[in-house]
Amino acid sequence: MFEIHPLYSLAGVAVGLLVGLTGVGGGSLMTPLLVLAFGFHPTTAVGTDLLYASATKTVGTAVHGFNRTVDWKVVRRLAIGSVPATLVTLLALAYAGTKFDGTEHVITVTLGFALIATAIAMAFRRQILAYYADAIDAMTDGKVKRLTVILGVALGVLVSLSSVGAGALGMTALLVLYPKLPTNRLVGSDIAHAVPLTLIAGMGHWAMGSVDFGLLVSLLIGSVPGIIIGSLVSARIPDHVSRAVLAGTLAIVGGKLIF
């Protein structure tokens, strides 16, 4: 029987609400929260957060799918790259764990770099979007597709190692690649793509023994209602409001990471 921790459940509510509303805040907020505020080992935080993200984003995908705020073409393109990359990364981690003693250190270092990259993407999102706007407008759909698959590969590796990237980094890249799509459809697509990505990565970490199921259950109790509320609100607010909420969320998460 798992012991339920109310404080962890409250953290799940807050993070679930942000994920449902913006597609951002899962790994980039929950993983450092578990490590820095609650004192969990980075490897345990990564593995538990991946299964937590899979469960919460499955609920979010159902809500976004019902409201038709998922672009399945974008999801397929991302998954073509991310699923094989995730499997290869997990196999590499499993092999390294049997041959070397520094696997946990690799995960910890990757988590640190992922958090720094996330903070940069958050701090300079507007400049990034403006810098690439003209180049993206001139691109053919085929090139956008290839770049989306490459993005999926990068997210598959990064998320498998650190649980960070599917939300903040993925959303920034999607906003660059698909500037004409409404934000709530990109949010829904980002959440839908994260389901197979985090599930496969989370199962791999489970097999390696780096999942705390008491923590997982506590987080899910709070996050499921949180992500339902956030997803419902996301589908019913104007696009410019959604963009403002997304920017505010990125700034808050970036502040947490920096300070």
Image (spheres, grey):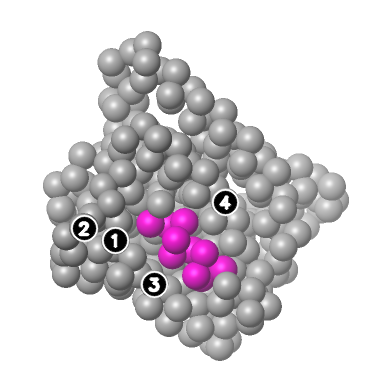
- The residue wearing badge 1 is 217
Q: Distance between the residues labelled 4 and 2?
A: 25 Å
For the residues marked 3 and 1, what is the alpha-carbon distance in whole angstroms? 11 Å
Q: Which of marks 3 and 4 is nearer the N terminus?
A: 4
**Magenta segment:** 52-61
For residue 258, say whether it is visible.
Answer: no
Query: Mark 2 belongs to which amino acid?
Result: Phe
- Which of disc 1 and disc 2 is earlier in sequence? 2
- Residue under pointer 2: 2
User: Circle 3 is placed at which residue position?
Assistant: 224
Identify the secondary structure beneath mark 4: helix
For residue 26, which numbered disc appears in the image?
none
Q: Name the residue under label 4.
A: 196
Say whether residue 73 is visible. Answer: yes
| Badge 3 or badge 2: first in the primary sequence | 2
Q: How crowded is mark 2: few (under 14 residues within 10 Å), some or many (20 or more)?
A: few
